[in-house]
Amino acid sequence: MKKYVLLALMCAALAACGDDETSAANSNRGNNDNNVNNSNNSNNVNNANNVNNVNNANNGNNSNNANNANNSNNANNSNNSNNTNANNVDYEAPLGSVRPTDPILPENFDPQKTYPLLILLHGYTATSDFQRGWFDFEGQQADREFIMIAPDGLSNSVGAQYWNATEYCCDGEDTGVDDVAYLSGLISEAKQRYNIDADRVYMVGHSNGGFMSYRMACDMASEVTAIVSVAGAMWYDPDQCNPSEPVSVLQIHGTLDAIVLYLGKLPDLVSGGYPSASESAEMWAENNGCDDTPAELEDIDISLLLGDETDVYQYENCDGGSDVQFWSIFGESHLPAFSSNFETQVLDWLFAQSK
């Protein structure tokens, strides 16, 4: 909640005093009685003048007090107007004029605080509600304190939602919708409304959402700090991606994925292709100036399969402190059965990245 400071205006009372005016005695009239009368008249005049001066002074004070009171009221009205404007900000109002999406704020949201921004992108035919339920980042939102946006892609003629990411996925009807502009617009609008840490803007996407996360890293590298692609892939042609600066990348893929193939797909007459999971990470290692060969780190457990089923590879010594990793989930499909460790491990990696 905002804390408002009430400004008290001090009114200064102005004291006014009148000068006595003395009437000269009539020297041509030598009569003592007349002199006495003149003296009395002079005193009466003086008394009258004094009374008038006091009244005038009081009137002056009253006028000043009235002006001060008016000034005080005007100042208070101005302050109240400012407070009203601040209170009129609806922090829960939808973002995005064309495709509105509700912001997801942390518990005890404070508009004065600075927050990271996380954008969650669903896969082809999926929805934002499905993605939020599957990737339960909101369960850690209160402790980690970040703002999240989970927008929806457009629907095609059969009602399937999609993102226009690469030549392969997934604008199959060639609508040409500019999802880069849409998502970058959401980021800009979030920055205008909230205190977003511009050095900590993250994207996580599954499948088509992973393709779209890569597209944003390629086209809007200055706006995106790090991305996580789950079962997504890069452009088949690496020359299609020309990032202006390093972006940290984490590629996560199941070895048994039969939808977005673990080993990639060559272009054909029907559709474009995409690189393998490891090649997607390798392309970004080259973009970020990392070492050519990744180091193999300790295996981790992020799925319900028994044991530490996920191999972790990291490209080291990347430009600008960026990081590129590839997590290979042995025996998992296009829709891995993630354990609660998944959200923890992914957010640990994401929030360690900064521009």
Image (tube, rainbow, N blue to C red):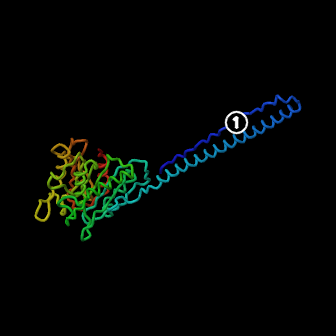
- Residue type at mark 1? Cys
| Residue lying at the far left of the rendered structure | 269
Tag 1: Cα neighbours inside 10 Å, few (<14), some, or many (≥20)? Answer: few
| Left or right: 166, with 196 as reference point | left
Q: Nearer the viewer, residue 95 or 115?
A: 95
- Residue at the front extreme of this rendering: 28
- Foreground: 273 or 337? 273
Instruction: Identify the element where label 1 is drawn.
Output: loop
254 left or right of 103?
Answer: left
Residue visible at 82% across and 28% down in the picture:
27
Q: Say if residue 48 shows up in the picture.
A: yes
Residue sitting farthest toward the bottom: 158
x, y percent for residue 162 = 25, 63
Vertical comparison of 159 with 336: above or below: below
Provide the residue designation for mark 1. 17
Residue found 30% across the figure and 51% down from its top? 202
Q: How many marks?
A: 1
Please indicate, yes or no, whether residue 307 appears anywhere in the rendered image.
Answer: no
Quadrant showing the C terminus: top left
Residue 332: quadrant of the picture: bottom left
Location of residue 40 in the rendering, given as x and y in whole percent from the top left corner? 84, 35
Q: Is residue 19 above or below residue 231?
A: above
Q: Front-most of 207 and 254? A: 207
Tell me where residue 291 appears, x and y as whole percent. Answer: 17, 43
Q: Quadrant of residue 289?
A: top left
In the drawing, does residue 62 fall left or right of residue 28? left
* x, y percent for residue 326: 21, 51
In the displayed structure image, the side of residue 208 where residue 199 appears, left or right: right
